[in-house]
Amino acid sequence: MGIVGNLHLERGIAHKIEGQYDEAIRELKTALEEEPDNAEAYHQLGLVYGFIGEFDLSMVSLQKAVELNGSNLVARNDLALTYSMLGMYDEAKEGFEEVLRIDPSNEVARKNIIFFS
């Protein structure tokens, strides 16, 4: 990751934590302009979109984060949780199952998969 993209990512995360979602979106989109394959920027952008109720955009961003970095189990869990909130239960179950296939002791997936058993 380049210095400029990393700076925008860090600023975006800081704005997200402070609840400054418009600023977070702006910084994260700038990070993605600098580095279009930045999985963590997509992940964070997906979270911000979820916080403001833009679930379709959240899902698209989280899917892209997982596509770019399939080993990021936090992003995979966040995507599965978003599917669950949208009533996409089959997709949510598949998401949690994939996390557990990769990491059988993953607590987030283990706690959430029980709702789909």
Image: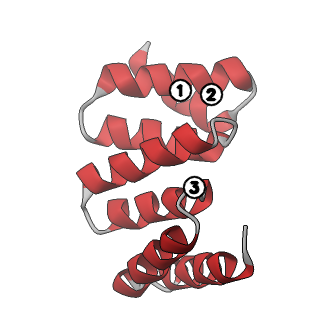
List x then y, in percent, for residue 114.
Answer: 49, 21
Distance, label 1 to label 2, CA atoms, is 5 Å
Distance, label 3 to label 2, CA atoms, is 22 Å
Residue 72 appears left or right of 12? right
Please give the residue where the numbered disc 1 appears in the rendered image.
96
Q: Which amino acid does label 2 sit on?
A: Val
Q: Do the residues labelled 1 and 2 touch (CB within 8 Å)?
A: yes
Please give the residue where the numbered disc 3 appears in the rendered image.
37
Which quarter of the picture shows residue 103? top right
Question: Residue at image x 73%, y 67%?
Answer: 1
Residue 24 appears left or right of 39? left
Nearer to me, 45 or 35:
35
Question: Residue at image x 45%, y 35%?
Answer: 80
Please give the residue where the numbered disc 2 appears in the rendered image.
99
Distance, label 1 to label 3, CA atoms, is 24 Å
List x then y, in percent, for residue 78.
Answer: 49, 46
Looking at the image, residue 102 lies above or below residue 26? above
Question: Residue at image x 31%, y 24%?
Answer: 89
Q: Nearer the viewer, mark 3 or mark 2?
A: 3
Label 3: state its secondary structure.
loop
**N-terminal-most mark, 1 or 3:** 3
